[in-house]
Amino acid sequence: DSGVTQTPKHLITATGQRVTLRCSPRSGDLSVYWYQQSLDQGLQFLIHYYNGEERAKGNILERFSAQQFPDLHSELNLSSLELGDSALYFCASSPTGSSYGYTFGSGTRLTVV
Amino acid sequence: AQSVTQPDIHITVSEGASLELRCNYSYGATPYLFWYVQSPGQGLQLLLKYFSGDTLVQGIKGFEAEFKRSQSSFNLRKPSVHWSDAAEYFCAVGPAGGTSYGKLTFGQGTILTVHP
């Protein structure tokens, strides 16, 4: 157990729907990073939050949004889902806002049918 | 734009044989360099990282990697592979500074199969 908790582990939903992926960082970590792992795009950085504030954005679609709450857990919201959004979504946490000391969670596998 | 290339999609070795996984990067300045391993159903685990200093870095599980600036490479090696090393390996780079500090760019991964 890495200490980073992602729920749910698996999610199957239909096109056009909206889902929320949840991430609880390791105790004491203030940063949360979201990555998407898909067969065609590989592992791609989506977004970084530090202590509730957005720090950096990567290749995140406009249909996707994220936030980090006061208790430091983070949610990634995916809407108007398309088949191509099927992927493994990873969350990672680190102690500070400027660190490569990532700890990854085990991911949420999203299947859009 | 920065990029990471892992030329080998799939490598098969026999248990006890040596291993080298290749990684080349394209970056404006020398980035920080990382190797991660992903076992089926698991998240990514950091094997080792290079920030500066000695270009040969040691990691966990008996892995090492060598940074070669002239070749923009950061190849991962292990002298004797164990069956439990079968997994997917990712090379990654990240900026040494700037607003994107902390953001990793990953290669496409190399799947390692180990034969008994």
Image (tube, rainbow, N blue to C red):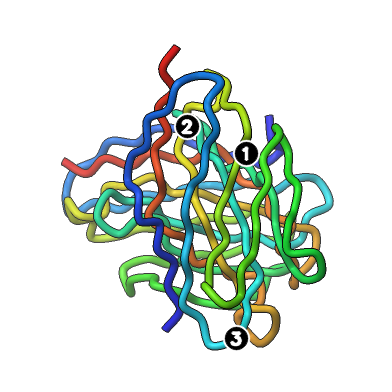
Q: Give residue B89's position: percent from left, percent from top.
A: 49, 43
Between the residue at mark 1 and the residue at mark 3, the CA separation in whole angstroms equals 34 Å
- In the image, residue B67 sits, relative to residue B58, either above or below, namely below
Q: Give residue B25's position: percent from left, percent from top.
A: 48, 71
Mark 1 residue type: Thr
Q: Chain of mark 2?
A: B
Q: Which residue is mark 2?
A: B87
Are the residues under marks 2 and 1 on the same chain?
Answer: no
Task: Assess disc 1: are there few (<14), some (14-19) or many (≥20) residues with their C-alpha within 10 Å of its C-alpha.
Answer: many
Quadrant that contains the N terminus of chain A? top right
Mark 2 residue type: Ala
Q: Which numbered disc, 2 or 1, marks the residue closer to the eye?
A: 2
Q: Chain of mark 3?
A: B
**Residue B71 located left or right of residue B79:** left
Q: Give residue A106's position: percent from left, percent from top.
A: 54, 37
Residue A36 falls in which quadrant of the image? bottom left
Residue A93 falls in which quadrant of the image? bottom right
Q: Which residue is mark 3?
A: B29
